Image (cartoon, rainbow, N blue to C red):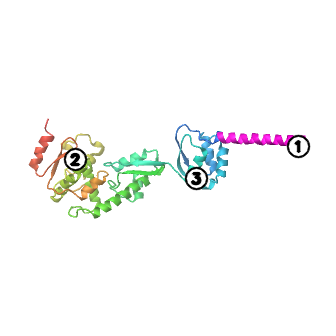
Amino acid sequence: MLIRSKGKILSRIIALLLLLLVIAWIFTSKDILVNQAQIFQVKSGSTMGEVAQELSDRNIIKSKRFFIALSKLLNANKKLKSGYYEVSPDTSVFAFIEQITKGNVLKTKVTLIEGKTIQHYFDQLSKDPSIISKASIEKVMGSIGLKKPYEGWFYPETYIFNYGESIENVLKKSHETMESKLSDLWEKRDKSIPLDSPYEAIILASLIENETALDYEKPLISSVFIGRLNLNMRLQTDPTVIYALGEEYTAPLTRSDLKFDHPYNTYRNKGLPPGAISSVGYQSLYSALNPAKGNELYFVSKKDGSHAFASTYDKHKENIKKYLNSN
């Protein structure tokens, strides 16, 4: 009896030691080891074993076995979802497994600002580490369904995407947003304006966008351009010359620049240029389709961001003398 009793005690001691070892193992293995946030990609088709291996190789977890065992216990193996995830300090292995099985992927914010060219957007997105870049701008435009000129077809706004989204899908979303905004505004436009297509509205809006940053001035600028179109006058807007010159442009514009032979130079050519010169915000697009009522045909910068408007050339010359030629 004494021997049997000693055996039971020994067994209990061994069981207790094993339990303590398991508890110690759990407590030393339950936490993520990073000191600062990291991004971890769960590749499509990955297994929990492969995820555990990569986490271990990157020293994000202490025990690969614990990660796999806990995954099995939670029945998480068949729920694994691919994508990019943020691994934060003080996160438990349990929380991370829950994260990658629920698909709580990392998000990224993309802000496209008004008045920029499609090349600017493409370069911006190509440098963004949260966006995947694989194709040329021509291939991306083709996949979206756009033919040249591409300019103006992308709506500037802040968009939220999954981390690792493609440039194509970012620009596709921006393009779809522009189409939706444009369709609605085109239907509600001032029917008296001399614009024959929605894209002509984008072209006009891009000129307005580049002439003023002041929303209250945009319907006035639009009115001047519409008045000039109605009278078959040249639009003579500096931003079209700057766009035409491209990388050859150096400020300020010169008289020889204004004579530059190019389809987009509105000092040489009547009517709208053949394409937009930049992206356009909502207020510029709205103003292109709903100009102010007035007979102004000229405007000049006051050098404070605003403009002085005139209905006659004589008054325009007075404004030039007042705001540009004054000391």
Q: Which residues are magenta?
A: 1-27
Say the numbered circle drawn on residue 238.
2
Query: Label 3 sits on what residue type?
Result: Thr
- Give the distance between the C-alpha atoms of the residues marked 2 and 1, in whole angstroms: 102 Å
Q: Which residue extends farthest right?
A: 1
The answer to whether the residues at label 3 and label 2 have Cβ atoms under 8 Å apart is: no
Of pointers 1 and 3, the one earlier in the residue sequence:
1
Q: Which residue is mark 1?
A: 4
Residue 65 is situated, as x and y percent measured from the top left of the image, at 67, 45
Relative to residue 67, is residue 147 depicted above or below?
below
Disc tally is 3
Query: Label 2 sits on what residue type?
Result: Asp
- Give the distance between the C-alpha atoms of the residues marked 3 and 2, in whole angstroms: 55 Å
Residue 54 is situated, as x and y percent measured from the top left of the image, at 60, 44
Asked whether residue 42 is drawn in magenta, I would say: no
Residue 92 is situated, as x and y percent measured from the top left of the image, at 59, 43
Query: Label 1 sits on what residue type?
Result: Arg
